Image (cartoon, rainbow, N blue to C red):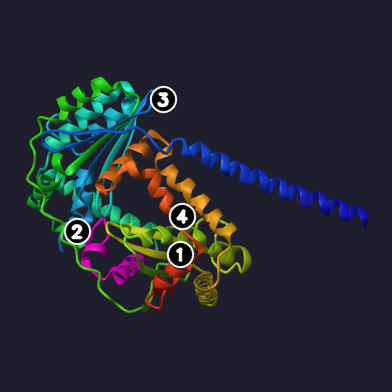
């Protein structure tokens, strides 16, 4: 009818108008973020080797302080897993002038927030407080860097707490066992495959001497970076930093990190009977280029094409079109100088699990052999660009963490716009070439069966 045609035309106009508004919003957001891509960072190094970065941001009367140490689970030895994670916890158990857990209460009493994180190659402590509380944070951080309390009682409590956390994680994540088995398959060596939190049997055997040696080897000023972002006076802050940190003795140079070479292995398909899991599923992984290689730029854009966001190929295929996946996530995971492309899917039954695998391999094949449209490539780049800039543009805390991680990764902040441009300059032919290079039959596929 004529009325139906009119309504149809109105709907089409509304859709087109909405699309235009969305694209305009994305463009304006990107332009606004581009203006903040370059931020002023001053740096200097203390006599004891502590690297310091300062970045003024007077938008709010707040300040974020990050202390990051170049140590994580990669620095552990067989039979001693969990040491790095344990040290993170012990850093809150007291030092010469601060009692057990007082660090936390001091920060919270002034209205601040704090957290810590241990990864494979770094351990990060960060707190955000009112800017007039900067001396408090620096005093707390310097005291535990200089004089952490390591005794039998604290080590015993830390070990018990860590083992309890392992039990808690196992009880709440029924796919934890299969996840750890997947990493053993895809990394195929001790250094990269063992969990950051450690293994229960190793933690039980850790001694006070182990903890002392680890602390005095890696928790030293010459193995750390201090980054302060926020509302401060540039002329005074250097004197405050020197007051609290320059008297801490320099440590011995930590031994070089010797990592295993990447082993050449063929594709692997395994099945694990995971009786705790409520649904069947699978892990799919590909070994890809190191984050320090040129191919990594294209792989990062491919990640967005395939599975980042609800407009990605795999999301649309598994959820919108075929509706065969119950849970779906993944992406590129970096561990120091290695990276993998991981996909995790759970399904309602074995049939839909097989259908999901078929659908994923079909999309991978399409991306290897068919040209991606310019529109789809541009959309993926724009989403990537927003996420990239948001790494350091969401808050002063995110900026401080970003600066610290950039330094520990041996990258440079000066080249930030050029670094982003390398991602955005990826071409259609780059995508096809990289897909054929890394997404091969040498995949790691772990199927998860349930009872």
Which residue is identified by label 4?
425
Residue at image location 75% in from the left, 47% down from the top: 14
Closer to viewer: mark 2 or mark 3: 3
The residue indicated by pointer 2 is 81
SS category of the residue bearing label 4: loop
- The residue depicted at 41 percent of the width and 25 percent of the height is 60
Q: Which residues are magenta?
A: 175-200
What's the distance in space between the residues labelled 4 and 3, CA to CA?
35 Å
Give the Cα distance between marks 2 and 3: 41 Å
Mark 3 and mark 1: Cα distance apart in space: 43 Å
Measured as percent of width and height from the top left, residue 79 is found at 15, 63
Q: Secondary structure at mark 1?
A: helix
Q: Nearer the viewer, residue 281 or 17?
A: 17
Marks 3, 1: nearer the viewer = 1
User: Which residue bears the numbered disc 1?
Assistant: 430
Quarter of the image for the N terminus: give it: bottom right
SS at mark 3? loop
What residue do we see at 9% from left, 47% from top?
253
Q: Position of residue 422 (x, y in %)?
A: 41, 53
Q: Residues within 10 Å of mark 1 (few under 14, many from 20)?
A: some
Our reading of the magenta stretch's main secondary structure is helix
Of the image marks 2 and 3, the number of the one nearer the N terminus:
3
Q: Considering depth in this image, is 200 or 10 the residue closer to the camera?
A: 10
Q: 120 above or below 94? A: below
Q: Is residue 99 visible?
A: no
- On whether residue 186 falls in the magenta region, the answer is yes
The first of marks 4 and 3 along the sequence is 3
Crowd rating for badge 4 (residues with CA inside 10 Å; few <14, some 14–19, many 20+): few
Q: Along the polypeptide, which appears first: circle 2 or circle 4?
A: 2
């Amino acid at each position: 009818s004529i009325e139906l045609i009119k309504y149809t035309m109105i709907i089409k106009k509304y859709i087109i108008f909405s699309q235009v508004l969305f694209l305009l919003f994305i463009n304006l957001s990107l332009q606004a973020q581009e203006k903040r891509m370059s931020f002023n960072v001053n740096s200097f190094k203390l006599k004891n080797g502590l690297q310091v970065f300062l970045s003024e941001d007077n938008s709010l009367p707040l300040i974020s302080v990050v202390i990051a140490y170049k140590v994580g689970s990669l620095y552990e030895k067989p039979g001693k897993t969990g040491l790095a994670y344990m040290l993170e916890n012990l850093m809150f158990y007291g030092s010469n002038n601060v009692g057990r857990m007082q660090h936390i209460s001091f920060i919270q009493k002034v209205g601040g927030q704090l957290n810590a994180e241990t990864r494979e190659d770094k351990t990060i402590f960060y707190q955000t407080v009112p800017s007039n509380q900067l001396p408090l944070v620096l005093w707390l951080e310097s005291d535990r860097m200089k004089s952490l309390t390591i005794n039998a009682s604290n080590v015993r409590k830390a070990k018990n707490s860590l083992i309890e956390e392992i039990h808690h994680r196992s009880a709440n994540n029924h796919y934890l066992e299969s996840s750890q088995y997947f990493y053993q398959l895809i990394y195929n060596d001790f250094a990269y495959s063992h969990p950051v939190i450690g293994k229960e049997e190793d933690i039980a055997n850790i001694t006070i001497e182990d903890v002392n040696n680890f602390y005095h080897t890696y928790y030293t000023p010459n193995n750390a970076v201090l980054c302060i972002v926020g509302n401060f006076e540039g002329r005074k802050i250097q004197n405050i930093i020197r007051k609290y940190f320059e008297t801490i003795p320099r440590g011995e140079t930590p031994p070089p990190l010797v990592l295993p070479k990447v082993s050449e292995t063929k594709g692997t398909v395994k099945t694990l009977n995971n009786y705790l899991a409520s649904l069947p599923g699978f892990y799919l992984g590909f070994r890809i280029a190191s984050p320090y290689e040129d191919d990594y730029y294209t792989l990062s854009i491919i990640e967005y094409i395939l599975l980042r966001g609800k407009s990605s190929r795999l999301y649309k295929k598994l959820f919108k079109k075929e509706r065969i996946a119950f849970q779906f996530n993944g992406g590129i995971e970096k561990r120091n100088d290695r990276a993998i492309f991981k996909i995790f899917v759970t399904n309602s039954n074995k049939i839909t699990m097989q259908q999901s695998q078929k659908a994923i391999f079909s999309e991978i094949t399409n991306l290897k052999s068919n040209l991606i449209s310019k529109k789809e490539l541009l959309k993926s780049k724009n989403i990537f660009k927003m996420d990239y800039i948001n790494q350091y543009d969401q808050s002063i805390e995110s900026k401080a963490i970003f600066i610290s991680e950039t330094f520990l990764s041996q990258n440079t902040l000066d080249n930030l716009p050029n670094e982003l441009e390398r991602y955005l300059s990826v071409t259609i032919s780059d995508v096809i070439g990289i897909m054929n290079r890394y997404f091969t039959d040498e995949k790691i596929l772990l199927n998860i069966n349930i009872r």
